Amino acid sequence: MYQTLRTSLLSSARCWDANSQQSYQTLFDRLDTNNDGKVDVAELRAGLHAMGIFRHGAAQKIVSSGDQNKDGCLDFNEFTKYLKEHEMKLWLTFKSLDRNNDGRIDASEIQQSLAELGIHLSKEDALKILQSMDIDGTMMVDWNEWREHFLLYPAHNLEEIIRYWKHSSVLDIGDSLAIPDEFTEEEKSSDVWWKQLVAGASAGAVSRTGTAPLDRLKVFMQVHSSKTNRIGLIGGFRQMIVEGGLTSLWRGNGINVLKIAPETAIKFMAYEQYKKLLSSEGKKIETHKRFMAGSMAGATAQTAIYPMEVLKTRLTLRKTGQYAGMFDCAKKILKKEGVIAFYKGYIPNLLGIIPYAGIDLAVYETLKNAWLSYYAKDTANPGVLVLLGCGTISSTCGQLASYPLALVRTRMQAQASLGSSEQLSMTSLLKKIVAKDGFFGLYRGILPNFMKVIPAVSISYVVYEYMKTGLGISH
């Protein structure tokens, strides 16, 4: 009975035909039972129940999403805008699932699409999903059936859209400040999550090794370049090669690779805990809370592995024969400077996480939504190039904002090894750099840093895909 009622209510509300405004008006009038020109939560809840939609909180979420003037209900314009935007998302998801472009979704297409997202379904489960949407009994779902099933479900239930657009920390640019990767409950209950972390760590190791010469040049310029001692790209490479040979370009890379695994593991575990603390039971975490959880997880991981950051800087800047290796370096720092030396530059490093993670996430969300609004026609899956482009631009913007803090951190980590008697604080060092080199002195070394972004992202993506295939999590 409810299916008949639901079909009669929704069948005329198609955003894609010429009479869409009139169709939406018909649906709106039926939901507006007290004829006051507005649909409130109670009216919408009653309408949803009449159509057999009993999802807890659905009516409240729809009103909250569409309520632009914050009066607690939807007028016709707000209702229409919400439905049009929601229907566009439904259309994109439908097209993404319709693998053979025959205008219908079958069980194998549902299985294949969800498998690529790390969610493995049996044929029986896929058929059950189909049956819940299938109106005409064909065991295939066309656009009208898909639309009628989902039109008045709130948009956050479209897990496919969210997962296609997942902002992944796979794009390793050598600075581990990004928001950690997210996994579904299905992935967490299987072995998919740790395989993805292993694939990501391997991709990061290869990517960092491939771009290590540019990373060392960045650190070299951050510490040694100034107005009176200008170091360019060619000059910097020449100085390093003359001093230590070609292999010296990879100094500090060993520990930079070594710290990926513990940092990734700590960040992932901390992120899951912070998300639980910040989100309500059973609700999807909002973007700003996700940013907060990511920033705190990043801070927790950085606190745990920060001594390795200091060692990396010292090993990167070392002269030939200065240290026999990582342990020799740690022993000499401990003997000469004490335990506190392993946390030099810790405060600017911690402060740098917030602008980086916040801007990275905000720019990524903005770019993806812009692409979705203006260019998405047939699919919710934007493809590799768009995802890589969004990730590269967003991480570059994040770096641009946090770079002065990264430079100050590196200078503080390196001060003792330069034979400097004065150990300046963060604010004193900032003032000194600006006084001596001007504002742009805070951006010394940013050119090689930008130069490594595209190769780092490309290498890490390619290796990640190969690793996923090797570990059996790619189809």
Image (tube, rainbow, N blue to C red):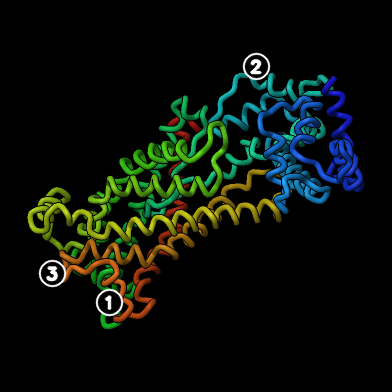
Which residue occupies the foreground of this view, 280 or 200?
280
| Most distant residue in the top direction | 124
**What is the quadrant of residue 31 in the picture?**
top right
**What is the C-alpha distance between the residues marked 1 and 2?**
68 Å
Q: Position of residue 466 (x, y in %)?
A: 45, 39
Kindly identify which residue carries mark 2. 124
Q: Is residue 190 above or below residue 460?
A: above
**What is the quadrant of residue 471 in the picture?**
top left
Q: Position of residue 414 (x, y in %)?
A: 21, 64
Q: Is residue 361 above or below residue 475?
A: below
The total of numbered circles placed on residues is 3
- Mark 2 Cα shell of 10 Å, populated few (<14), some (14-19), many (≥20): few
Task: Give the residue type at disc 2.
Answer: Glu
Residue occupying the point 47% across, 34% down? 469
Query: Along the horizontal axis of the image, is 287 left or right of 447?
Result: right
Residue occupying the point 49% across, 31% down? 473
**What is the quadrant of residue 57 in the picture?**
top right
Q: Is residue 234 above or below residue 140?
A: below
- Mark 3 Cα shell of 10 Å, populated few (<14), some (14-19), many (≥20): few
Regarding residue 102, the answer to whether it shows in the image is no
Looking at the rendered image, the quarter that the N terminus falls into is top right
Which residue occupies the foreground of this view, 300 or 237?
300
* Front label number (1 vs 2): 1
**What is the C-alpha distance between the residues marked 2 and 3?**
70 Å
Kindly identify which residue carries mark 3. 419
Task: Give the residue type at disc 3.
Answer: Gly
**What is the C-alpha distance between the residues marked 1 and 3?**
17 Å
Mark 1 and mark 2 in contact? Answer it, CB < 8 Å.
no
Mark number for residue 432? 1
